[in-house]
Amino acid sequence: MISQANEAQRSGKDIGEREEAARYYRQMLTIRRVEETLLALFSQGKVRGTVHTSIGQEACAVGVIDAIDVDKDIIFSNHRAHGHFLAYCDDVEGLIAEVTGHPAGVCGGIGGTQHLHKRNLYTNGIQGGMVPNAVGSAVAEKHKGTGAITLVFIGDGTLGQGVVYESFNIAALWSAPVLFVVENNQYAQSTPYTLEHAGRLTERASPFGIRSHAIRADDVFSVRDAAREAVAYVREQCAPYFLHLETYRLAAHSKGDDLRPQEEIDA
């Protein structure tokens, strides 16, 4: 009887894991196909401005956002936000309409690709511009006693912005419940991060006393587990956390401006 119960428990766990894997795969595939669609629409002249895709970085968005409470937690993102948006709300039509300037878009077609808002998700194209906003949001939620935390996505290039370190300082001083997530996709536009930053990116927040963790982001389950640990710490300790995800941008920086070495692209 005990062995049968254990077997049933294992079987149920396996089924649950398969269902989770299928859900994550659907989310990541949706992000990939939407990004490809937006690139095609840009080539047809149907997108204003530019398009920064998250092709290759899908596991970051899906794994991290699955770890938060989407009903109350707050998300801030950047110029490369389509994946975060879709992992958060799965509003494919609203996103495509917004990027193409249609009134049916989530911001009435006015915000475009970089300036999205839906429920508790906010994005902005200024590098590092949303980081102090995220810290302020976290402090506000702390004072209101909502139990909500704030999540902010930045890229490796954004770690060259001074306001990020000012934000680390305030977050640590004021015990802000904020999770800083760095998606290190190896390039700041066309510059390899190794040519832009001295020292280790994974240790950028440590001097401020902020707990930090770094993982490779090529497995969505690993990302989710690391994010769950980070979210639990931020929520329970009411303190900031720095999560560094090593990923890779498979597509160009934006639309067709791919200045990486051809042999690297081919590989």
Image (cartoon, rainbow, N blue to C red):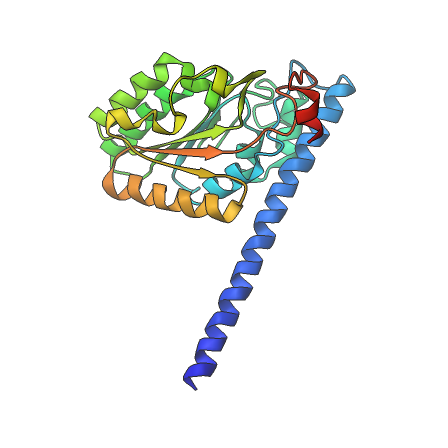
Q: Residue at (67%, 18%) from the top-left corner?
A: 258
Q: Residue at (56%, 24%) from the top-left corner?
A: 107
Residue 103 makes an appearance in the image? no
- Total count of labels: 0
Q: Residue at (49%, 20%) from the top-left corner?
A: 193
- Quarter of the view holding residue 48: top right
Quarter of the image containing the N terminus? bottom left
Where residue 244 appears, x then y in whole percent?
Answer: 42, 33
Where residue 209 appears, x then y in whole percent?
Answer: 24, 29
Q: Is residue 185 above or below residue 237?
A: above
Residue furthest out toward the left:
173
Left of 170 or right of it: where is 267?
Answer: right
Where residue 248 appears, x then y in whole percent?
Answer: 57, 31
- 108, 120: nearer the viewer: 120
- Quarter of the view holding residue 148: top left
Residue 39 makes an appearance in the image? yes
- 90, 65: nearer the viewer: 65
Left of 119 or right of it: where is 264?
Answer: right
- 226, 124: nearer the viewer: 226
Residue furthest out toward the right:
44
- Quarter of the view holding residue 176: top left
Q: Residue at (44%, 76%) from the top-left corner?
A: 6
